[in-house]
Structures are given as structure tokens and as C-alpha cells.
């Protein structure tokens, strides 16, 4: 893979959208906010700003560059 930007943004965004689609079918007591930020390499500007707004954040799942990580795992396992 030579274009990491496509993996960095596209795979993570599509995974979040699919998770939101699946979880929308369930009644969940707490509010789930699906938040996506771009170019966090330049200082976590979006996520730091969001985290400082006073919400009670109880969990975070970071799906950054999931395709390249799967490719690395497949390579290590010889798949």
C-alpha cells in the first residue's frame, strides 16, 4: 500500500459507519457519540477540543489505520 491516507481515513470511517448502523438497532441506556477527526497528527486538535468540553467520557475506541494493521497481522501470520 502506497497511499496511507486512504487507509487512515477511509477504513476507519467505514468501520464507524457500520458500527453505528448495527448499534442503531438496539436500545442502549447511554448515549453513544460517533466522532471522527482528521489530521490528528498535527496535534490532536479536534479530539483535544472535544474532550475538553466537559462531557463524561467513559470510553474511547480508536480505529486508526485498521487496514494496514490487518495487512501487517496477515503478513506476520503468513496468511
Image (cartoon, rainbow, N blue to C red):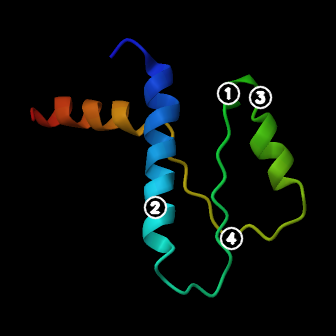
Q: Residue at x 18, y 29 (%)?
A: 75
The residue indicated by pointer 4 is: 58
Vertical side of 7 occupied by 15: above or below? below
Vertical side of 36 occupied by 60: above or below? below
Q: Residue at x 51, y 39 (%)?
A: 64
CB of mark 2 within 8 Å of CB of mark 1?
A: no
Q: Is residue 37 left or right of residue 12?
A: right
Q: Residue at x 55, y 49 (%)?
A: 62
Image quarter of residue 14: top left
Q: Secondary structure at mark 3?
A: loop
Of the residues under marks 2 and 1, which one precedes in the sequence? 2
The residue indicated by pointer 1 is: 39
CB of mark 3 within 8 Å of CB of mark 1?
A: no
Mark 3: few/some/many CA within 10 Å (<14, 14-19, 20+)? few
Residue 28: give x, y in percent of width and height.
57, 84
Image quarter of residue 41: top right
Residue 70: give x, y in percent of width and height.
29, 38
Q: Which-is-in-front pick, marks 2 and 4?
A: 2
Amino acid at each position: 500500500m502506497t497511499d496511507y491516507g486512504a487507509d487512515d481515513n477511509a477504513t476507519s470511517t467505514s468501520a464507524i459507519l457500520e458500527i453505528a448502523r448495527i448499534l442503531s438497532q438496539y436500545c442502549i441506556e447511554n448515549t453513544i457519540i460517533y466522532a471522527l477527526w482528521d489530521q490528528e497528527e498535527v496535534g490532536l486538535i479536534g479530539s483535544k477540543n472535544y474532550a475538553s468540553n466537559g462531557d463524561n467520557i467513559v470510553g474511547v475506541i480508536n480505529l486508526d489505520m485498521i487496514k494496514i494493521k490487518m495487512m501487517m497481522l496477515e503478513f506476520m501470520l503468513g496468511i
